[in-house]
Image: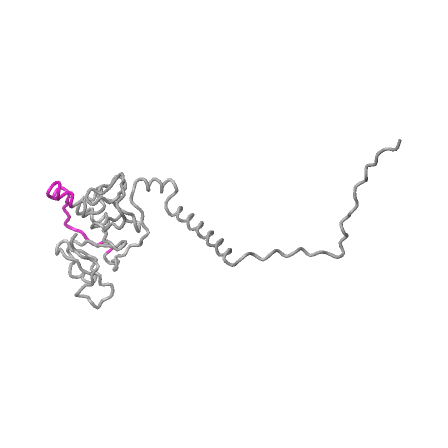
Amino acid sequence: MGEKFFNPCLVHAGARKNERNVFCLDCCTSFCPHCLPSHPPHRLLQIRRYVYQDVVRVDDLGKLIDCEFVQSYTTNSAKVVFISERPQTRPFRASANICISCDRSLQEPYLFCCLSCKVKHLMKTEGALSKHLYQCDFLPLPNSCELDMDGQLTPDSVLDSPILSSASSASGGWPGCRAVACTAGTEFVRKKRSSVGGSAPPPRPAPVSLCAEPPSRRKGVPNRSPLY
């Protein structure tokens, strides 16, 4: 957790995409994807970047440590968790559920906003992590032959929450909801563009035919009073 990632690799300073986004558990150091040939049998963990913060996939980190009660996000069809505590720019607001370590607002039933907060809490309460660590002798990179060199994640993400999952199932999934939102946005833009060009020209009067007979102006038969 104390390692600094996404710094330029000194060995491959002149190479493109030389950010150090891979961590070797055997060497306890980070390196860039160009250094992979030097760590073929080692246990490797790919670090990714989301909203300028370091994250790890739950499927990868879950092989090393128990990630239960750490708030996760779903992005690019994969669950990720933040490694370190994030700075809070907004003032603290009272919430029904907050992080035990840093008081960040969370969703139910999570207790920690990142892996660092959980480790700090376990070290403070139990004094060790042995009960929460897993034996892992083999940890390759996912799709190492097609490794994502920059490790960037798109900001299209949602909280991994049971509430959101049930809402997604009830609405037929997120793609359908996004399609409706995109359609509504498109219609709004079309209406806005039509109004920006000024008022619409007045409709042209219908042509009058000179051969047509004028409308009759005769009045109805008058009702006269009887003569006595």
Give the residue at x 23% y 57%.
Answer: 144
Find residue 74 and report its horizontal and vertical position in percent.
29, 48
Apparent side of residue 27 relative to residue 211 in the rendered image (left or right): left
Give the residue at x 76% y 49%.
Answer: 215
Give the residue at x 37% y 46%.
Answer: 174
* Quadrant in the rendering for residue 226: top right
Find residue 150 and report its horizontal and vertical position in percent.
26, 59
The relative height of residue 35 versus residue 165 in the rendered view (above or below) is: below
Q: Report the span colored magenta.
A: 120-143
Q: Is residue 179 magenta?
A: no
Q: Residue furthest top?
A: 228
The rendered magenta stretch, by its main secondary structure, is classed as loop
Q: Residue furthest front?
A: 228
Q: Nearer the viewer, residue 133 or 2?
A: 2
Find residue 35 and report its horizontal and vertical position in percent.
18, 62
The C terminus is located in which quarter?
A: top right
Q: Is residue 122 magenta?
A: yes
Find residue 28 and report its horizontal and vertical position in percent.
13, 55
Q: Nearer the viewer, residue 174 or 224?
A: 224
